[in-house]
Image (spheres, helix red, strand yellow):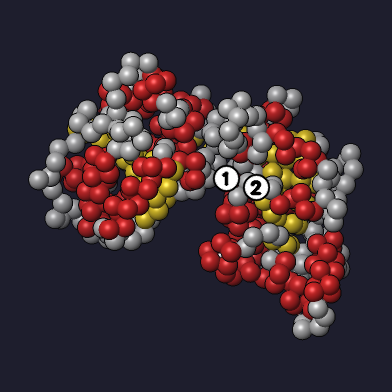
Amino acid sequence: MATVNFDINSLTFNQSENHEQRAARDRIKLESTIPITGPPGTGKSTVISSCCFDLVNEYSPVLVLTPTNSMVNSILSRIDSLARCSNLQLPRGFIIRYGNVTELNYAYPHLNSYTLDSLVLQHQANNGGGISRIRAGIDLMQNARIILCTDYIAKDLKNIIQAGAVLIDEAGLVSLDKMGTIFSSLRDNNGKVIVIGDDKQLPPPSRDYVATSLFRSILNHFNSTLLRKEYRFNRDILDLINPYYDNKLVADHSVQDISTAEIAKKDYGGINDNLRKILQHDRKIVFVDTNDGRREDKHFVNSGEVSIIKDIMKGCQSMGIDNIMVITPYKQQERMLQLQLQQQKVQGIRIGTIDKFQGQEAEVAIISMVRSNTCQDYHEATGFLNNSRACVAFSRGKRKTIIVGDQTTLTKNKFLASSIDTITRKDGFFIWRNSN
């Protein structure tokens, strides 16, 4: 591949960087191991993308790893956008997306040309069989300047490439036992390791409750740069999670006042008074109290909350609001929500667990908290619904967050009690009354 060098500081996307993003990039140029703390919506993908171009001249290939394919695809999309905005003419094979690309082909079909399979097909042009294609794939990987894949499949690369820099997104979800594989991917002791994550969100998925994340381990030995400015949600939603971050985060002016008023296609007509108040545009954070009337069952399913959410969804539908995320801590509740809302044939809605939706966003988030019981100890009362999960759930919505739950149970947890108090001060607390 022909050498491609460029001055990253001349690229147009740097014009929108904030102070902390620039500080993070400056550290990366000077240090070998750099942790960057990126709370929800603070522009982690922007930093990752610009860092790839910062490092590629001196440290190629740059290996970008994340825990899931959807995260890999999101970063690839951002890198592609920045390259196009900066009019970079990158040669074929400069960037390679390695691994499972089923979701990429569905969600980002225009990025298919970056996949290894696509590049091999172009390279072969109907010549050669299986062995020839394998050799072509290895040749392409060894000449690539930026490679993106999941941390799981990175183990396949250690005998093919030696990276000059490894950049890990959502490192809080990467377990410490992956460290050997990741560091073995580096070319030599002069390589760089950049980990970006949020130690206040969910830890790596594991049956071991004392599992340590790669990110938390590195934080114990290196100072982190905090990305403070968030670009996802309005100030009211930020107020829900900011105490968890010692009130260090600020909303960018471009999002601080956004609401559903800008996306609703219809007015409140046809909605009963109960729903009208809940869906009012200037109420950006809402708590709907089930008033002890809808208990969880032994399988952590709360059918009463499902019924309430169905009514809220009908209200959103009648206003023409879509791009809605319905979130819950429990898989059993997820299944019931899917069953009931699919029968309602709601369009533009995603339903899933909090763990599944970490790193994703929607215009409106509706959260089914499930827990409703008479336990006095807050660990027993709220259980699996800990502060980290609540923080992830509360930070998915951009314009509006609606929390459905039992106030009496949830306020046994101090963080949840503080969140409900914040919502109440902003006139967003409602006791559910049936519309019938």
Callout 2 crowding tier (Cα within 10 Å): few <14, some 14–19, many ≥20: many
Residue located at (82% from left, 50% from top): 158
Mark 2 is on which residue type?
Answer: Thr
Do we see residue 393 in this rendering?
yes
Percent coordinates x, y for residue 402 in the rendering: 32, 40
Residue most extreme to the bottom:
126
Percent coordinates x, y for residue 285 in the rendering: 32, 38
Q: Which residue is more in the foreground, 386 or 254?
A: 386
Q: Which residue is mark 2?
A: 66
Q: Which residue is mark 1?
A: 43
Q: In the image, is residue 305 above or below residue 54?
A: above
| Residue 128: quarter of image | bottom right
Q: Which residue is more in the foreground, 223 or 11?
A: 223
Residue located at (81% from left, 69% from top): 134
Which of marks 2 and 1 precedes in the sequence? 1
Residue located at (55% from left, 41% from top): 42
Instruction: Indicate the secondary structure of the residue bearing disc 1.
Output: loop
Percent coordinates x, y for residue 156 in the rendering: 77, 53
* Mark pair 1, 2: CA separation: 16 Å
Disc nearest the viewer among 1 and 2: 2
In the figure, is residue 207 to the left or right of 148?
left
In the figure, is residue 117 to the left or right of 19?
right
Q: In the image, is residue 297 above or below residue 59?
A: above
Identify the image quadrant of the C terminus. top left
Residue most extreme to the front:
298
Identify the image quadrant of the N terminus. bottom right
In the figure, is residue 195 to the left or right of 62?
left
